[in-house]
Amino acid sequence: MKVVLRFVISTMLLVAAVSTAAAGGMRDDKPAPAAAKASGGPVRTVYAAHTQGYVPYGFVNEKGESDGFEIAVLRAVDAVLDEYAFAFVPTSDEDLLIGIESGKYALGTKGAWVTAERKKKFLFPENPVAASIIGITFRASDADKIRDLESFARYSGKLVPISPQSAQFALVQEFNKSHPDSPVALVPSDTFIINDAYLWVIEGRYDAFFDLKLAFQNSVVSEKGAFHSLADRLAWVPYKGIPTWTLFNRNETELAAAYDRAIEQLRADGTLSALSVQYFGEDVFSYVFE
């Protein structure tokens, strides 16, 4: 009877462990051993969550390893900080946000922009981890008239509607405040993602779509993109780089401060620019820090 009972308990513990890993993300990287840290002092292991499929920001590669630009930056930060060892956890967006807020994860990355709502829930460091390059997608036939957001606003300003909950909405509002004589027509959308935006531009319903460079490259430029058939009929020009941030649990003030010191060092020695060229093919920080 005791043998059967031990078997049942062991089985229940195994099932519970597997279920927990599936629900909360698998811990991909083991933290650096304390002995490997140069200081010789105590080393605290902190869990860093990241997205699983947001190429090239954060993803799980073919070897099942945490990969991507933001993860590469955090690894470089980890190498600088003797008092911390990072363990990476690929997980869902929802688990990442809930986990950081609850303290399950000390920090996490997901190509996150700063918003007023997020600032209430998370601790933002002083320095961004990366940047999203945003611009406008428009008909290639209008390339002689549209060269940037300013010329688009003068041309018509008819922009595909944007959800007021999107950080992009606030960007257009800021542009309009600084260009009162030729503002962009900012129409609120009921949905966060508009799947037909490229088609609406081609059809002439609108003259441009506020679009991330990465999204345009993946959806239109890439031969595997869902809208690659429109590649010769659409064009894209940049507007500005929007910083993306590592999110910290609000109690992790010391960790965030240490992170900032490391980021400043990595920017000064060229590490951030080199990693950006490796993952993006260009220095995305040049759009943010001029």
Image: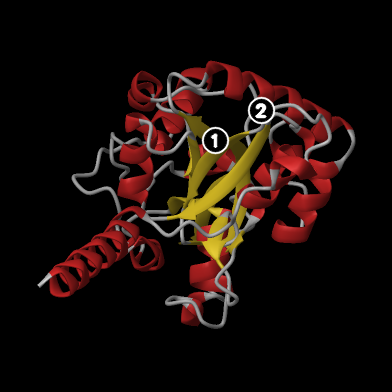
Asked whether, in this view, residue 148 is left or right of residue 114, the answer is right
Instruction: Count the numbered circles shown.
Output: 2
Identify the residue under disc 2. 259
* Viewer can see residue 245: yes
Q: Nearer the viewer, residue 82 or 264?
A: 82
Q: Nearer the viewer, residue 186 or 62?
A: 62
Asked whether, in this view, residue 45 is left or right of residue 211, the answer is right
Please determine whether, in this image, residue 37 is positioned above or below residue 226: above
Residue 184: horizontal and vertical position, in percent?
Answer: 43, 35
Image quarter of residue 5: bottom left
Front tag of 1 and 2:
2
Residue 154: horizontal and vertical position, in percent?
Answer: 52, 37
- Marks 1 and 2, the one that precedes in the sequence: 1
What residue appears at the point 38 percent right and 37 percent down from the top-left corner? 104
Amino acid type for the residue under numbered disc 2: Tyr
Say which quadrant the N terminus sits in. Answer: bottom left
What residue appears at the point 28 percent right and 66 percent down from the top-left corner? 14
Q: Residues within 10 Å of mark 1 (few under 14, many from 20)?
A: many
Query: What color scheme is it?
Result: secondary structure
Asked whether, in this view, residue 141 is left or right of residue 282, the answer is left
Identify the residue under disc 1. 246
Please determine whether, in this image, residue 233 is positioned above or below residue 36: below
Q: Tell me, yes or no, whether the two marked residues, 1 and 2, touch with CB atoms within 8 Å.
A: yes
* Viewer can see residue 160: no
Residue 170: horizontal and vertical position, in percent?
Answer: 40, 28
Residue 51: horizontal and vertical position, in percent?
Answer: 46, 54
Question: In this view, which residue lies farthest toward the left?
Answer: 1
What residue appears at the point 46 percent right and 31 percent down from the top-left corner? 171
Say which quadrant the C terminus sits in. Answer: top right
Amino acid type for the residue under numbered disc 1: Thr
What residue appears at the point 49 percent right and 41 percent down from the top-left corner? 108
